[in-house]
Image (cartoon, helix red, strand yellow):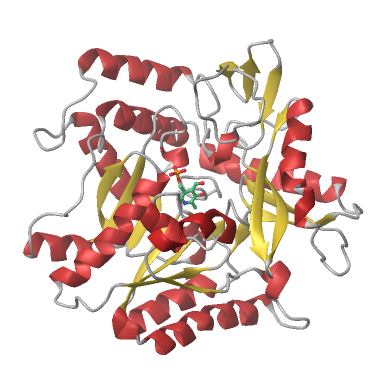
Amino acid sequence: MTRLLHRQIHAELPMAVGGRGVELFDSHGRAYIDASGGAAVSCLGHGHPDVVAALQRQAEKLAYAHTSFFTSEPAEALAERLVADAPAGISHAYLVSGGSEAVEAALKMARQYFVEKGEPQRGRIVARRQSYHGNTLGALAAGGNAWRRASFQPLLVETHHIDPCYAYRYRQPGESEEAYGRRAADALEAKLLELGPETVMAFVAEPVVGATAGAVPAAPGYLARIREICDRYGVLLILDEVMCGMGRTGTMHACEQDGVAPDLLAIAKGLGGGYQPIGAVLLSRRIFDAFAEGSGFFQHGHTYMGHPMACAAALAVQEVIARDGLLANVREMGAYLRERLEMRFADHPHVGDIRGRGLFLGLELVADRETKEPFDPALKLHARVKTQAMARGLMVYPAGGTIDGSRGDHVLLAPPFILDAPT
Ligand code: PLP
């Protein structure tokens, strides 16, 4: 009997014992093609020799030094690299251990920014209904995924949710993508005016929605208009690229493709490629200056922040991506995979939509392709697809979300960036 409290107590999981390239192996010697990178994590696949060597070097040199006593070479080098590759205006990186921690820290940075600036009345968060921002209490409050939140409602801070930007579901007949993007963004302005914009600190969104919706990109112009609205009302823009960032969509950050730079950018998953737990908040100069000229510190901190081993792994992952030209491969292989999916499922009665960017692709499963009627949530179809795929030696990520009150079924593909086209 296991002594480990698993995510699903009654599920019987195979024992993962090894990994090489795009494959994972279980204790019975079965191989699984990792077509989802776990949950969009393993961007270099498994057992990458350069990352393994970097980890070994760092372990031999220095495994840990508490960040209140010391800085470290890998942490400094990683921050330097992340800022150099960041969207305009980003001046510093704050290093944490994962995605929820990154979102949590970003929310606290937003709040402290307004305290430092003498606007303590700004404490409200606006986010979107179909979103996931993590499982810690602040991040969970920001997320709009009703079933993840339900049991914890009394512990969650006040958050106001607007509709997501989700063209497949919400674009009206005859409406252009651009017009839809504008309309979806204008819901933010309406919400700010309803709440009183001077009470709102931040708007939080994933540029390409992952775990709740299966790779739904923002409509053209949506994020640019969101940026405009945030600026008009002095609200900070927090983009959560924990899942869609770090090259997954074919550019380092997904928001580059929308021509938008946030005030705070949360990253994780592909940052360390699964070789170590690591995440970061990239913050803009004005946030840094408010702290530097104000109290002189950010009132936060975890024991493992800026962990040298995690930073060494992330640095090695990012160096391999740059050295091997993997962003170009993500674009090329993403286009190829998408084309193959579109050919394969062109007439499938239950594949309603195929979408995404780069190697971040989603399929929406529907009971009826014409009406877009979702399947009965009781069928838990997305979970069954995952189980059936595993039985066939394939890992795909099941994404469930709330659509008009009922769960939608999506399958997410996020394979490693090292893919080759079959010869
Ligand atoms: N934000 C987004 C967009 C995510 O997809 C996730 C995880 O799936 C998180 C935050 C939370 O990250 P973590 O599971 O590393 O805490």
* Viewer-closest of 374 and 316: 374
378 displayed left or right of 85: right
What residue is shown at x 46% (from left), y 33% (from top)?
273
- Figure check: 313 above or below 407: above
Residue 367 position within the rendered picture, expressed as x and y whole percent measured from the top left: 86, 58
Residue 147 appears in the rendering: yes
Question: Which residue is at 62% across, 21% downward?
Answer: 24
Relative to residue 393, is residue 368 depicted above or below? Answer: below
Residue 85 in view of the camera: no
Name the quarter where the C terminus is drawn. Answer: top right
Asked whether, in this view, residue 337 is left or right of residue 93, the answer is right
Q: Residue at the spot x=66%, y=30% of the render? A: 11
Q: Nearer the viewer, residue 151 or 158?
A: 151
Name the residue nearer the viewer: 391 or 59: 391
Q: Quadrant of residue 391?
A: top right
Q: Residue at x 73, y 46 (%)?
A: 382
Q: Position of residue 356 (x, y in %)?
A: 65, 54
